[in-house]
Each structure stands twice: as structure tokens, then as C-alpha cells.
Image (tube, helix red, strand yellow):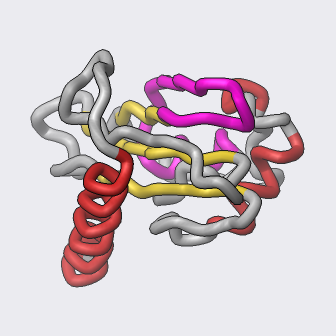
Amino acid sequence: MTTTFLRRSLALVAATAFAVLSAGTSASANPTDPVITPAPQAKAGFVLTLSPTSTVSSVSQYARVTLTCSPDGGTHSSPEKACDALREVDGYFERLRPLPGAYCPAVWDPVKATARGYWGDRRVSFEKTYGNACEAGVATSGVFFL
């Protein structure tokens, strides 16, 4: 699990650095957030994060991935599935439905899920706390399975 996490982290750092360097900088609420600007062919682009909400969390560091839709891609583990789920709700994260028949362990390990980016011409900013990382993924049709 640690090796997978490190590989994803390195890929994410490289993708984030590329996005920041190619997009330039602009003022934002958090100056450490990468700047997301629409690519000519992409209709949506996000930075998705899961972060621990307590110091004793098993999610010891931020999990951060990129997701682009139409064309589907980024560092997300399943960009096609995530984009399909977002297309069903027109990019409104709060409208995502839970995965049917999926269950998570009843372990309290709260995480904050955030999505920052754009859907078409609309800026998107989503933030919600879930009981654990599994619940974040299940509750959002798999979008936050990072």
C-alpha cells in the first residue's frame, strides 16, 4: 500500500507541477492550490483531495489527484467512471448518488473531501467531511475513490 501511495504521490506532484507551470498563477483563496485553467479541448477539470481531519487519522497525508472530463483523464485511478458519474449530475458534486450495494467499515476516521476546478464555464468548489475515506468514495459514486 505504501508503494502504491508513493507512486501516486509522485505522479500527482509531477502532474500538479506541470499544471502550475503551464497555467501560470493567479490569486486564489489558498495560494498553495494549483491553478486550473481549461485546456482548449477539455470541458471539465478538477483537483480532488482527501485530507485527514484529525491528527490520529489513518489518512496520514493529503491524497490529491487531477481529473479532466471530455476527454477523460488526469491522475485519477478511474477517470472514465468518475467523469460518467459527474456527467449524470451535470458536474454538481452535491448531487452525486451513493454507489448501490457498497458498504464501508464502521470506522470513524473522518476525512475532508474537496473538489476545485471547473465544469464547462462554471467554477466548481465542493467540500464535505465524511466518516472515512471509503464513505467519501461510496457517497460520491466513486469520484472520491482516490
**In the shown orientation, is residue 127 left or right of residue 56?**
right
Q: Spot the residue most to the top.
A: 29
| Percent coordinates x, y for residue 2 in the rendering | 20, 76
Query: In this picture, which residue range is highlighted in magenta?
Result: 116-140
Whether residue 102 is visible, yes or no, is: no
**In the shown orientation, is residue 34 left or right of residue 36?**
left
Residue 134 included in the magenta stretch of the image: yes
Q: Spot the residue most to the right.
A: 88
Quick one: quadrant of the N terminus? bottom left
Q: Is residue 127 above or below residue 43?
A: above
Q: State the residue at coordinates (46%, 59%).
A: 146
Q: State the residue at coordinates (60%, 68%).
A: 73
Q: State the residue at coordinates (72%, 48%).
A: 43
| Percent coordinates x, y for residue 104 in the rendering | 56, 52
Whether residue 129 is visible, yes or no, is: yes
Residue 70 included in the magenta stretch of the image: no
Q: Is residue 142 above or below residue 132?
A: below
| Percent coordinates x, y for residue 10 in the rendering | 22, 72
Q: Which one is in front, 88 or 18? A: 18
Q: Which one is in front, 39 or 89? A: 39
Q: Spot the residue most to the left.
A: 55
Q: Is residue 4 above or below residue 69?
A: below
Total number of numbered discs in the rendering: 0
